[in-house]
Image (spheres, rainbow, N blue to C red):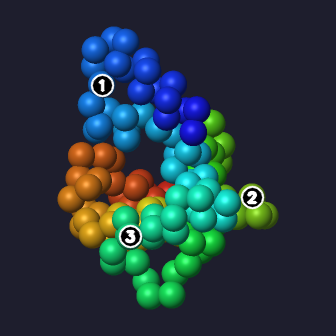
């Protein structure tokens, strides 16, 4: 949890600390690790409550796996790695669509409507539809 302390200290020194800034500053890796078995247990096994609309039966380990997939997908995009090809090198948007849907699912699990949350971003569906037409 050094990441939390370091971030908080930095913001407080600069006089710009607030809770929203703290939450936004922590990495996707940090949030994913909170659902690892050890950290989830250490946190009192209460973190699943942030997903009030999750699918019944979805466990801590399921959430950890899903968040890991989302994080890895995000990293592929951030590192400009291909996300629209199948294992044979043929154009396919299946991988990207699957992961985009997973992101939408988790927004819904938090009790938010995905379209409202991502309304100010580029719509991946439009881009993926264009790729499918290639």
Discs 1/2, front:
1
The kind of secondary structure element at disc 1 is: loop
Any mark on residue 77, and which? none
Identify the image quadrant of residue 48.
Answer: bottom left
Question: CA separation, marks 1 and 2?
Answer: 47 Å
- Asked whether, in this view, residue 42 is left or right of residue 87, the answer is left
Callout 1: 10 Å neighbours few (<14), some, many (20+)? some
Q: Position of residue 102 (x, y in %)?
A: 48, 68
- For disc 3, the marked residue is 49
Q: Where is residue 57 in the image (x, y as percent from the top left)?
A: 51, 87
Any mark on residue 89, and which? 2
Question: CA separation, marks 3 and 2?
Answer: 40 Å
- For disc 1, the marked residue is 17
* Mark 3 or mark 2: whose residue is earlier in sequence: 3
Question: CA separation, marks 1 and 3?
Answer: 26 Å
Callout 2: 10 Å neighbours few (<14), some, many (20+)? few
**Residue 124 visible somewhere in the drawing:** yes
**Residue at the spot x=45%, y=68% of the render?**
46
Identify the image quadrant of residue 69.
Answer: bottom right
Q: Where is residue 49 in the image (x, y as percent from the top left)?
A: 38, 70
């Amino acid at each position: 949890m050094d990441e939390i302390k370091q971030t908080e200290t930095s913001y407080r020194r600069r006089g710009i600390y607030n809770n929203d800034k703290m939450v936004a500053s922590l990495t996707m890796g940090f949030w994913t690790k909170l659902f690892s078995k050890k950290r989830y247990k250490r946190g009192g096994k209460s973190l699943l409550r942030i997903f009030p609309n999750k699918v019944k039966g979805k466990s801590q380990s399921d959430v950890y796996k899903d968040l890991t997939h989302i994080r890895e997908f995000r990293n592929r995009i951030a590192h400009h790695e291909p996300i629209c090809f199948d294992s044979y090198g043929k154009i396919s948007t299946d991988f990207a669509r699957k992961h985009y849907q997973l992101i939408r699912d988790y927004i819904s699990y938090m009790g938010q409507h995905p379209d409202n949350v991502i309304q100010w971003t580029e719509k991946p569906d439009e881009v993926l539809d264009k790729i499918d037409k290639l």
